Image: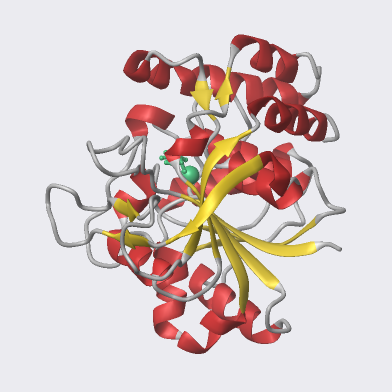
């Protein structure tokens, strides 16, 4: 059965690959819309980049909405040091000509969840959780209508990538993350513990390039750009494809393994703001609120990704 999804995103090279993987999989995934949020770069750029990616895939029909331009309560922190000035540095891609929808992304989220049968829409956040939390705060009636949230964010054993204790998406808007993690919606979480295993090695990037298509070339160039940061910082083998883990789980959940555990978000401490306090070892009696992933079959993940990108 086709799963109906809304992708909430701040592209970002890895967001772009996640979107392309979804666009390449129409039998399994129907994209009701893409909602842009401020994160890796400011909102005007994430809304632009989402449309560039749709056009790269020849999908000018996808509806792209712009949402919140800053976190619920804090100033925006961006990540140009990772993603470049545009957020999508690497390939040279044309400016998008498809329109940005005039409706606000948060309105779109609320209206869609109210209109569609309850329990039939999955939300896929790939950036800070501001849009999703704004929708839940404004329209609490939609919370119980969400089928599942599958998100990239947080870390436990890998701890942090923007501070010593926090992953970027959760750090940027911890209050929003708190709303989402406390919402009661079934959550599937892809933390750095998983995504730092989904590394684009040279052989894997060569496989993208060998597709010999505009999409294959663009993805190879994006990961070429994106990896310099992780190589320098972590000495890792290549760029971690964080956000595509979300779309890959929708297609092949058996590639991932994790635990149903309690995860709380630190919002008070300046030192550990945005930390995902994950009770991996079950040392509290706090109830489970998330399936927190810990491992991925990286070869299976890249085989899936390369095969699907080849369809575009
Ligand atoms: C997350 O932060 C962003 O830089 C990436 O797009 C990903 O969503 C990884 O921490
Ligand atoms: Ca992202």
- Quadrant (top left, top right, bottom left, bottom right) of the C terminus: top right
Dividing the picture into quadrants, the one containing residue 5 is bottom right
Instruction: Work out whether residue 15 or residue 235 is closer to the camera in this orientation and state it.
Output: 235
Instruction: Work out whether residue 261 or residue 164 is closer to the camera in this orientation and state it.
Output: 261
Residue appearing at x 31%, y 63% in the figure: 284
Residue appearing at x 68%, y 71% in the figure: 121
Question: Looking at the picture, how far across and down is residue 175, in whole percent?
Answer: 29, 65
The reply to whether residue 53 is in sight is: no
Drawn side of residue 158 relative to residue 255, left or right: left
- Give the vertical position of 134 relative to 95 (above or below): below
Question: Looking at the picture, how far across and down is residue 129, in whole percent?
Answer: 42, 60
- Give the vertical position of 118 relative to 228 (above or below): below
- Give the vertical position of 204 relative to 29 (above or below): above
Residue appearing at x 40%, y 42% in the figure: 40
Instruction: Work out whether residue 291 or residue 182 is closer to the camera in this orientation and state it.
Output: 291
The reply to whether residue 154 is in sight is: yes
Question: Looking at the picture, how far across and down is residue 191, in whole percent?
Answer: 45, 44
Dividing the picture into quadrants, the one containing residue 61 is bottom right
- Give the vertical position of 148 relative to 56 (above or below): below
Drawn side of residue 282 relative to residue 22, left or right: left
Dividing the picture into quadrants, the one containing residue 111 is bottom right
């Amino acid at each position: 059965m086709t799963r109906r999804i809304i992708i909430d995103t701040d592209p970002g090279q890895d967001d772009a690959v996640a979107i392309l993987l979804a666009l390449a999989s129409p039998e399994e995934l129907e994209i009701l819309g893409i909602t842009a949020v401020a994160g890796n770069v400011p909102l005007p750029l994430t809304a632009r980049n989402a449309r560039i990616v749709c056009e790269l895939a020849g999908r000018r029909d996808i509806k792209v909405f712009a949402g919140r331009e800053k976190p619920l309560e804090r100033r925006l922190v961006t990540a140009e040091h990772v993603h470049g000035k545009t957020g999508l540095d690497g390939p040279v891609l044309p400016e998008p000509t498809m329109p940005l929808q005039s409706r606000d992304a948060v309105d779109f989220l609320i209206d869609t969840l109210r209109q569609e049968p309850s329990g039939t829409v999955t939300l896929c956040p790939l950036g800070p959780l501001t849009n999703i939390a704004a929708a839940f705060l404004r329209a609490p009636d939609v919370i119980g209508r969400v089928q599942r949230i599958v998100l990239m964010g947080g870390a436990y054993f890998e701890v942090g990538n923007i501070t010593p204790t926090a992953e970027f998406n959760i750090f940027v808007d911890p209050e929003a993350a708190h709303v989402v993690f406390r919402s009661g919606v079934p959550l599937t979480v892809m933390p750095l513990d998983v995504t730092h295993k989904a590394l684009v090695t040279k052989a894997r990037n060569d496989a993208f390039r060998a597709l010999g298509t505009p999409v294959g070339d663009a993805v190879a160039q994006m990961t070429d750009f994106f990896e310099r940061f992780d190589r320098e910082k972590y000495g890792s083998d290549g760029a971690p494809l964080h956000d595509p883990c979300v779309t890959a789980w929708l297609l092949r959940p058996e590639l991932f393994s994790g635990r149903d555990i309690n995860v709380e978000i630190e919002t008070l401490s300046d030192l550990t703001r945005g930390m995902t306090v994950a009770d991996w070892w079950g040392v509290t009696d706090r109830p489970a609120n998330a399936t927190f992933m810990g491992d991925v079959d990286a070869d299976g993940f890249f085989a899936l990704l390369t095969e699907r990108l080849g369809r575009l």
